Amino acid sequence: MSAEVAIQKFSFPFSCAAHLSSKEKVAQKGCIQVKEVELNELEESPILSERRPTDALDALQHNETQVQESTKPPSGGDMVAAHVSVSAEASQEAAVCRRSVLETLRVESEDQRPAAKRQLSSESAARTITAVKKSAVRREAEQKTQLGQRGTPCAARAGKRKQRKELFTSSEVFLRLDSHVIRAGAELKEKRVYDVKTIVQSITQGTRTELERVRAIWVWLCHNIEYDVSGYLGHSEKLSSTEEVIAAGRGVCCSYSNLCSEMCREVGIECQEVPGHSKGIGYRQGQSLKHVKSDHLWNAVFLGGQWFLLDACWGAGRVDMEHESFVKRFDDFYFLTDPEEFIDSHFPDEEKWQLLDTPVTLEEFERRVFKTSAFFTLGLRLINPHHFYIVTNNGETNVSLGFSRPTTFTYEIIQHRDLLHSGASDQRESSNSSFGLVTVSHRSMKLQLLPPASGTYDVKVFARPESAATPLVWVCSFTVECPAPRATEDIPENPFLSWGLQPVAGSLGVAGSSQGSEVAEVDEGAFDLVLKTSRPLMVLCELVHPQMEAVVAKRCLATQIQAEILRCHVLCPFHGFYRLSVFVRDYEKTEVKFQNAANFLLHCKGKVIGPDELFPPNLGSAYGPGTRTSEAGLSKFSHNSGVVSTQQGKCNITFHNQRDLELHCVLHKASGIPLSRHLFCTYTDSKVTISASLPGAGVYRLGLYARIAPGGDFSPMCDFVVRNSCADPRPPFPCVYSAWRKGCVLFEPRLGLLDPLSWVHFRVRVPGALRVSVVGETRTDLKLNKSRVWEGEVFSGNGLQELKLAACLGESCDMAVLMTFDIKQLENEE
């Protein structure tokens, strides 16, 4: 091949392409004679214009060797006839011109190499070219025409750029290969094998594709080379040669990139070292990099017709600057990372290595929010803000992230530190800060930040999949400037991390909420929460306030459980912020633990509830009619909310008893003393009426019980809270005995305490009674009227003896006491 052909073949896309004088071109024409057809084919091949200057140098050196060999006389009768005839004189002229061209190319190609390349050894800078058949050249040329020029990596090409997920669906496809590489690496280390070629042959054994070979090299680097923290800090000398790096098992970023390039070359994969800036150790968030020398090296590999980025240094682990140590942690994200994600942490010196359709400026790179690999592996997206530096407005600012699958979030806010990677842990279990609120909706997270004082703060956001039990990991960072803080009250710690419905609430059976994730303002000291459910649930609630004791908190909550709704009534006895946490489980699965479904932040800044207005102690979990009463056959309650308010000191609660259960009622005030004489129960057909006559103002607990199985114990059905604002005490009801049963109705008198020496009109219905009498100092028989009501006038007496209402209920002549009435004592006359 002539030198002229070589120059035509390697026409460079760089500015430093060789320029030959006319004399040199003329001299080259007589050097070698080439078949015209062959020359035409070579000139037409697109691949001829796609080589680098280094390739041209290698080609010319290779060509010179071939020419020297071709001057030897052919030996053997079956030797193929030579295509090129060379005279001795032409050979000398060709040699002269070739040396001239070689010298020119070497000088100019040296100028185009980046500074990092010049530091490479002569061995790593060497390139070889293999002679191939013309048919193979054509095929390769056709592929290159479709994929674009290899030497100019840019995203603007015909056709869409392949993403990492198009090369492999997940890293699990490399599971067997990775295991082999890790095992082989350990064996080679044990045998003290430090030769690059031997290592590459061992770890790539059995690989079938270029992708697998690159993967093997990258995994070996991540698992066998640790970052040389001591060398980086200047405490020890940095290792330079590849053998020293492999033997010691440590190196800095250029050690990783140099080794990657050398190992890729061993398997015939084109690999470039890419110098630039990174947001790694030593990076100060917000610093200007304009006049700062780049501090990092990573790699780009050419696979399937396009360039891909990788960083084995970042894939091997992280540096803990606080303890000046390296933390080994394999991070698969930095293997063939998509350019759109890589640019958030890596900025190359040469714009072309961004591999982006629209390149990012250095200023934009500096302003970008730092995102860890976990940010992308969790499928998060940044909604607001788009730059890392935020200034509060009225002492508040917000951060918002989107997610595609249920995710748990928390945050950390601390005084500003210079270094982004300062050694602080990149994992957290929960947030112990009360200077922010995390609210999670169906597809996004909002972090409301309220710095406690003026100054600059670092904010880290942590996340993990909702179903995971692992610690939350650092996903992104911000710097918050607070010129003037907002006057705030203490916010209770939220161990469940986010506010509003938890992302897992739907799977727990909670379909919706009357309150969103924002702060609920409580103006009248009371707050009602309604949760819609997709199936029957049990619920427990917890209320927390910085100044409130647990005993008081229990008297601030009442929960009502219904088939498709859960209600929680909250009372606020203090000003400030409250955390209301809701826990649920399936109604029937008593063995299952309650799980947190929602957390709400309440803010009470108006009226508060006094201690005497709180819910009565020992209020049951079944507050108000609900699932339990429905299952027992109790229905059509006159009061469905669970709260009965009265201003007259008396009230009635009615409902239907469809299963004819035996019922029992109790009435308590805060003191806990039963007030049985202040309740009266009337049961006709299926309708039940519970009448209450209250002894004074205050809050009462009215408990309803039923005997489900004959001979069994009474089970709680539901509790009512009766609020009485009437200060005057109401008199008690008569004392009722067991003979008073279904169908019995007392019309008059309803009071259980009668005036002495007075006539009292009695009207009572007693089904099946043969005789009804009132017995006191004398006996008075009541008469049965046309309405089947027994009635009559009875003298109360002087109060020395109570009145008994009795009835003969069977063939026996014995009278059974239905109820008794007390008589007021006569006042002593002076």
Image (cartoon, rainbow, N blue to C red):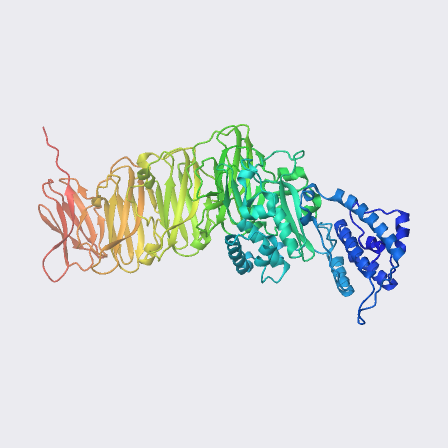
Q: Quadrant of residue 825?
A: top left
Residue at left 88%, top 57%? 88
Residue 772 at x, y percent in the picture? 15, 54
Residue 94 at x, y percent in the picture? 86, 53
Is 32 or 210 nearer to us in this picture? 32
Total marks placed: 0
Q: Is residue 338 shown left or right of residue 142? A: left
Does 484 appear above or below 583? above
Residue 117 at x, y percent in the picture? 69, 44
Q: Quadrant of residue 753?
A: top left
Q: Quadrant of residue 133?
A: bottom right
Is 646 or 107 nearer to us in this picture? 107
Which image quadrant: the N terminus? bottom right
Residue at left 32%, top 55%? 629
Q: Is residue 409 shown left or right of residue 66? A: left
Q: Is residue 75 visible?
A: yes
Q: Is residue 283 shown left or right of residue 760? A: right
Q: Is residue 395 visible?
A: no
Is 33 or 748 nearer to us in this picture? 33
Which image quadrant: the C terminus? top left
